């Protein structure tokens, strides 16, 4: 399989090939406002979720990282393998196959922390797993992409968004650390903050879903195969993550947590990597997948909350 873009060309979304096609145009000012508002809301949300974390339990997960190890195995073992098998099974076009594989190699997203709280999962494990998978992505993303594209004769150099990974870590760890401190010093007040955070989380998910569709509405295409994969991929992640956790004798609470962490990928990181690595013309075939995946993982999360595994 071959992508028609040589590694010597400047394959980014702002390449010399010109402006983005009409299908990828977004409203600049609205996009900036959305980015700033969502970043602030995410920081407040992670601060409030940090108020549910007890340092003693967090340290116990770090000292005996069995749950973390299972989660990382799901994240960088099962998900990339699933992405590769889906790309092969559905005989995807080269650009589409790369988009699916990149999604599978991304670390877990913070959306899993919100759903874990709502299903009364292990918040200490959830936040630890999200942080560890983001750190591990610095090495595991390029390794997984290299291993799975060896047989594809890929001429394109994939650009790992290290800056985006760093920003994600900062936005995750600093608010959570403040939340843990508040929970330690003022446990009663932290419960109130946590309740507010649950509401903020719901609003944030709604804003992200609506704004994501509005800002990139032109990048959607009617490829039913990609939509099918974007529907079943997160479901496979949730189910296999839960089963692996169950097989390794994790508690029911941890099984729920690992399941959510496995299926919920970092959509923004996937989009950033694709934009850094490919031309605007190629992005037309790619961006619909992470957008659809993001919407379906939201629906899956709400479904899991509704049935209360």
Image (cartoon, rainbow, N blue to C red):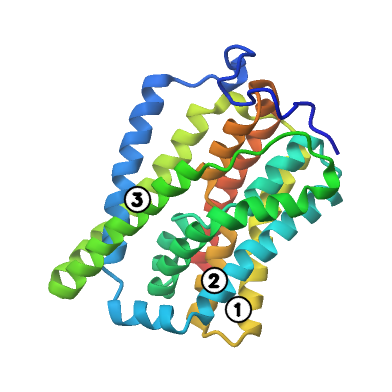
Mark 3 Cα-neighbour bin, 10 Å: few <14, some 14–19, many ≥20: some
Q: CA distance from mark 1 to mark 2?
A: 7 Å
Residue at (43%, 41%) from the top-left corner? Answer: 208
Q: Earlier in the sequence, mark 1 or mark 2?
A: 1
Q: Residue furthest top?
A: 18
Q: Of the numbered discs in the image, which one, if any, rests on residue 171?
A: 3
Q: Earlier in the sequence, mark 2 or mark 3?
A: 3
- Give the residue pinned by disc 1: 245
* Front: mark 3 or 1: 3
Q: Callout 1: helix, strand or loop? A: helix
Q: Callout 2: helix, strand or loop? A: helix
Is residue 308 in view from this perspective?
no
The quarter of the rendered structure image containing the C terminus is bottom right
- Give the residue pinned by disc 2: 258
Residue at (61%, 36%) from the top-left corner? Answer: 274
Up the image or down, 147 lies above or below 69; here it is above
Percent coordinates x, y for residue 179 in the rendering:
24, 64
Is residue 146 in view from this perspective?
yes
């Amino acid at each position: 399989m071959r992508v028609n873009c040589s590694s010597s060309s400047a394959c980014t979304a702002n390449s010399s090939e010109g402006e983005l096609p009409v299908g990828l145009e977004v409203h600049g000012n609205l996009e900036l406002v959305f980015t700033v508002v969502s970043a602030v809301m995410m920081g407040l949300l992670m601060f409030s979720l940090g108020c549910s974390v007890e340092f003693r339990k967090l340290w116990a997960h770090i000292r005996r990282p069995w749950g973390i190890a299972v989660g990382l195995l799901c994240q960088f073992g099962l998900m990339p393998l699933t992405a590769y098998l889906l790309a092969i099974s559905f005989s995807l076009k080269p650009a589409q196959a790369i988009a699916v594989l990149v999604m599978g190699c991304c670390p877990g997203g913070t959306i899993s922390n919100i759903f874990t709280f709502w299903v009364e999962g292990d918040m200490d494990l959830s936040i630890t797993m999200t942080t560890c998978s983001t750190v591990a992505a610095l090495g595991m993303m390029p390794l997984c992409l290299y291993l799975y594209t060896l047989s594809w004769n890929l001429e394109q150099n994939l650009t790992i968004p290290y800056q985006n990974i760093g920003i994600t870590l900062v936005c995750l760890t600093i608010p959570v650390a403040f939340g843990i401190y508040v929970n330690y010093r003022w446990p009663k007040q932290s419960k109130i903050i946590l309740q507010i955070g649950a509401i903020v989380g719901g609003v944030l998910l709604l804003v992200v879903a609506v704004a994501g569709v509005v800002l990139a509405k032109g990048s959607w295409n009617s490829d039913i195969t990609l939509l099918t994969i974007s529907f079943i991929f997160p479901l496979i992640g949730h189910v296999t993550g839960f089963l692996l956790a169950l097989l390794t004798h994790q508690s029911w609470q941890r099984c729920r947590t690992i399941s959510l962490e496995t299926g919920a990928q970092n959509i923004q990181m996937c989009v950033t990597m694709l934009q850094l690595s490919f031309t605007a013309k190629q992005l037309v075939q790619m961006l619909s997948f992470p957008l659809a995946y993001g919407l379906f993982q939201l629906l899956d999360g709400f479904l899991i909350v509704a049935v209360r595994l």
